[in-house]
Image (spheres, rainbow, N blue to C red):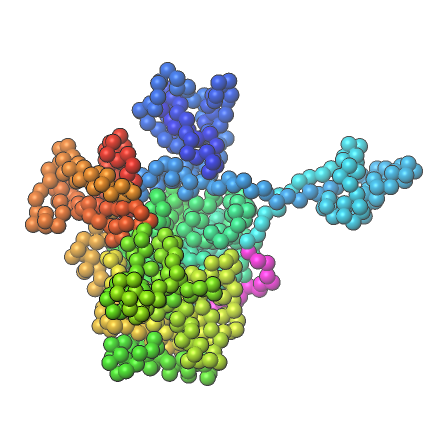
Amino acid sequence: MYADIIVDISHEHLDKTFQYAVPDHLLDKVDIGVMVNVPFGRGNKIITGYVVNLTKQPSYDILKIKDIKEVVVQRVKAIERMIQLAAWLRRNYGSTMNQALKMVIPVKDKIQAKQKKMISLVVSNEEACAAFEQFQKKHAVAMARVIQALINEGKSDVSDIQTKLNITTKTIQALEDKGLVQVETAHIYRNPIKETVLQEEIIELNNQQKEAIHTFIEDYDNEIRKTYLLYGITGSGKTNVYIEMIQHVVNLGKQVIVLIPEIALTFQTVQRFYKRFGDKVSIMNSRMSKGERYDQFKRAMAGEIRIMIGPRSVLFTPFNQLGLIVIDEEHETAYKSEQSPKYHARETAIHIAETMSASVVLGSATPSLESFYRAKQGIYQLMKLDKRATGANLPNIYVEDLRKELNEGNRSILSRRLAAMIDDRLKKHQQVILFLNKRGYAGFISCRSCGKVFKCPHCDISLTHHINPYGNELVCHYCGYRQPEIKECPECGSKYVSGFRAGTQQVEQMLSKTFPKAKILRMDMDTTSKKGSHEAILSSFANHEADILVGTQMIVKGHDFPHVTLVGILAADMSLYVSDYRASERTFQLLVQAAGRAGRAKVPGDVVIQTYTPNHYSIVAAKEQNYEQFYDEEIIFRQMLGYPPIQNILKISISSKNEEALLLACQNMTEWQDNIKNERTVSSMENNLGIRINEKEKIQVTGPIKAPIYKLNDIYTQIVLVKSKDYEILTDFKDKCDMYIKDNVLYKNISVQYDFN
């Protein structure tokens, strides 16, 4: 048996592994993640490393492979678990071990830890007074001043002493040499949470909340660890339930991870947790500096943090006493990684919890179909909150047919009902949220005379119009390509070149003209690119410094603004017809989440949904705010077509800059799929669609076919879709595919990536 070992857990060295032989007497002790001592280099210096892979195949001449010396007994358990987790991610989601390691290992950045030097006496006060008198007699004024300051003030900051007393480092060194003082270096951790004076809120829980908390605590105290689905309507007080559950777990000396889907949610969420738990809480997100992130990992490793809050990456916080993982808004797409390994936070959290004897709580007003299906199957325990915590009613929802508006002469972005309601709220000094699922100024740009659509030369998708102070331009949202605004069609010379589908900027400008006295804030990717911009916009709106908040998805998720009594959804079906089998589910979730921002306090709320398809079942169910009505219709659709959660889907993406090489590799992959040893491929009625049914493995293979965006940043991509009810069959298929292409010359310059479900 041979072990691949990394000798330094840091980003700079993760790509470099060294292979060692496992001696017979260590075979039962060496496993993935284990810390070992190995002879290294020409001098065989003994160094420490971690096992990241075990294999029976040597990578080079076995006569040159050295033996592992020993397994380290007092090893770092947190790092060991992280490496084992990386191996699990690689197996379950498909990636290299190095990609998985980089995902989970705490970052060892080249960031200097902040330090503070403290000076103190190491002799008694009597001895210090005697030394002080001696220094005065000898006219050693500087040393006398230091001793006097330490007698009077005790332990002090070295820099403060030097500044106040005008003392040099040499003087302090001389006092150390005489054995009178000592200088200690203390690490100061950067705190990403702004310190504010906070008072804990006194919260009255209703019976449903109490019941959910009691169920969890009773299970936890009886050593029962489960995955719970907390399904609660918007405003039902799910966060307060989380807080009480967390309090119980923390009281038992355990640590907690709280996942939230968007950086925009961090501000309000952290403040609520900070009120209860103070500096036991910390956060991690991509907007933090490298120094801040480094410090939070160090604090977590040292056990100084009890609760870590942030997006999916905080799952990899190196806690040693993890007791609970909470995933708020568990339905969010942000919990699925877009980089290899393309893991899902929900499944990964459940795996981590199982390995550390922790519980998992999933919370949402609009659960993912996967989670609700598992709750109905009894795999998760369902908890329901169907009343708003404040006693407030759900908002009134109106659906406005934009086809009818257009036929009756209204060409505005706003329906007549929504415009009248905005005017009414402004007069009453109440707040309004307008949600548009689109960033930038407008959608695609085209010529209305000849129909030419202006596309990115690298990505085969339309360019988007952006307004900038230094000149308007067309931007590719995929690769970042930019070009100046086009005012005349290069094909036919027409000047009727314009954009379709209003963007957030255009809505903001239209509102300024229609309601000139209204104060308007805009929140989208463009206005939140700077660090702290999310908090600034949300704080301003929460403090009622603006009347209307216009924005994209980030404004409708989880926020609680008591003065908002009207929510307008300007283009409800913009997400309804994208090429994704989850389009209806995503649309329903967005509409319900957006509607949930209205009327959360004492004043009733209204919601206006503007749509071209008012009879679509997702919009009808959203109007009724009836999740189970939507679920019952959508699950039939998934059953008919074999989509998750009924079946699992593996997408294999095959990419190359060389289109000819890509097509050759795809043809080869088709032949391989059809001729795997001992497997019989059966013809079917659907064969002309490129679908192959394999009876032995119970899989269905489609493709290779062109990806929805075939050319992206000058790279061509084809995809293969593999379906099976059994997830393990798909991971085996992925492993066989990996082994086949590993030494195949046809795949030399081909990238192959895997994405499950």
| Residue 461 visible (yes or no) | yes
Residue 447 point in image, percent of width and height: 28, 67
What residue is drawn where x is 42% and y is 73%? 509
Q: Foreground residue, 162 or 518?
A: 518
Q: Residue furthest top?
A: 63
Residue 305 point in image, percent of width and height: 53, 49
What residue is drawn where x is 38% and y is 26%? 3
Compared to residue 742, the image places residue 652 above or below, namely: below
- Tell me if 594 is positioned left or right of 12 in this view: left
Q: What stretch of residues is rendered in magenta?
A: 193-204
Q: Foreground residue, 179 or 657?
A: 657
| Residue 212 visible (yes or no) | no
Compared to residue 585, the image places residue 308 above or below, namely: above
Magenta stretch containing residue 610, yes or no? no
What residue is drawn where x is 35% and y is 79%? 418
Q: Residue furthest front?
A: 493
